[in-house]
Amino acid sequence: MLLSAVVGSTAAIGYGLAAIGPGVGVGLVFAAYIQSTARQPESSRLTQPFLWIGFAVIEVLALLGIAFGFIWANLPPK
Amino acid sequence: MTGQTIVLADTPFPPTVEDFFLPSIGPWGGPGVWFTKITVMLWLSVALLIIFFLVAYREPKLVPNKRQWIAESIYGFVRNSIAVDMIGKEGVRFAPYLTTLFSFIFVMNLWGIIPFFQISPNSHIAFPAILAMISYVMFIYLGFKKHGLGYFKHALVPPAPWFILPILVPIEFFSNFIVRPFSLAVRLFANMFAGHMLLLVFTLGGFAMLNANALLAPISVLSWLMTIALTFLDFAVIALQAYVFTVLTASYIQGSLAESH
């Protein structure tokens, strides 16, 4: 007897798992920037480009997850 | 507007990749779809930028009027806080290209939240791919111009003990020559793609709930409010991605121009 069923794609779960790493990474980048700015307020302008570069490099991991999710969604089933 | 997902009583709920391929506009369509809203937006962005910067700088004054001030602020921002900050004094000669890049990406992204347009051309990978290719060719060309064939050593061999080099050189090659252009393109593309997808999910989700049953219908309002909030988030992403693409291009140029270690 079928009481309940879940339909959909497990890719959503996969992407949720894949987003953990970049989430932690982006958090660390901003935490480090806030900390360095709190310790040395004059350095905020100096470190800002590196903040965004670090953010972008980590963020791309999460975005690759989105892109590949759609690319591999249409593979023929084995 | 043609090409928008048509909102009907039976809205197709989970938005798909098909929603990004818009139908052709008007008599230029023909059998092959090529003149779409995306094409119009591309030409519009180019025209807008050229006209804006030409008009703003037609009669430059010492005390600038509003238009000249805006144009000078954009250029000044890119020149001072991207080109010179990242590349150094030499960066001034790249400021025109970086400004063009920044404002072009910004305008192209901005279509994503302008009513009636509401999709960014950059959500098709072709546009970011070409922009990334230009940056890629540029920093490699500059590297060879500066270092000659020594550029390979400059780019691939970091100052490290010899026994670690067999690991480091392939990693550097992979990161400098393969991942860089790929990640530049994919970052911009995926941000715009995901932004459009999010807005679609919450807009169409509202209709899906409205049509589902009486219990879910009031919640659709919440979904549409979420769409408005996400539009603001999207604006932040749009500005940030234009900035990030430019900063990364500047930093790659800086890497090519740096004195060898």
Image: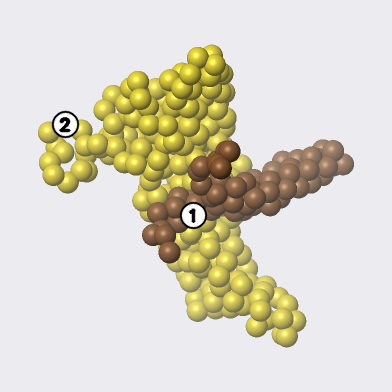
Q: Amino acid at mark 1?
A: Phe
Color scheme of the displayed model: by chain
Q: Residue at x 50, y 14 (%)?
A: B214
- The residue singled out by tag 2 in the image is B26
Q: Residue at x 39, y 43 (%)?
A: B17
Task: Kindly identify which chain the residue marked by label 2 belongs to.
Answer: B
Question: Where is the N terminus of chain B found, in terms of image quarters?
Answer: top left
Is B35 above or below relative to B133?
A: above
Closer-to-camera residue (B240/B187): B187
Same chain shared by disc 1 and disc 2: no
B229 left or right of B49 in image = right
Residue B217 point in image, percent of width and height: 50, 16
Q: Amino acid at mark 2?
A: Gly
Image chain in yellow: B
Residue B183 point in image, percent of width and height: 52, 56
Image chain in brown: A
Residue B6 point in image, percent of width and height: 32, 26
- The residue singled out by tag 1 in the image is A68
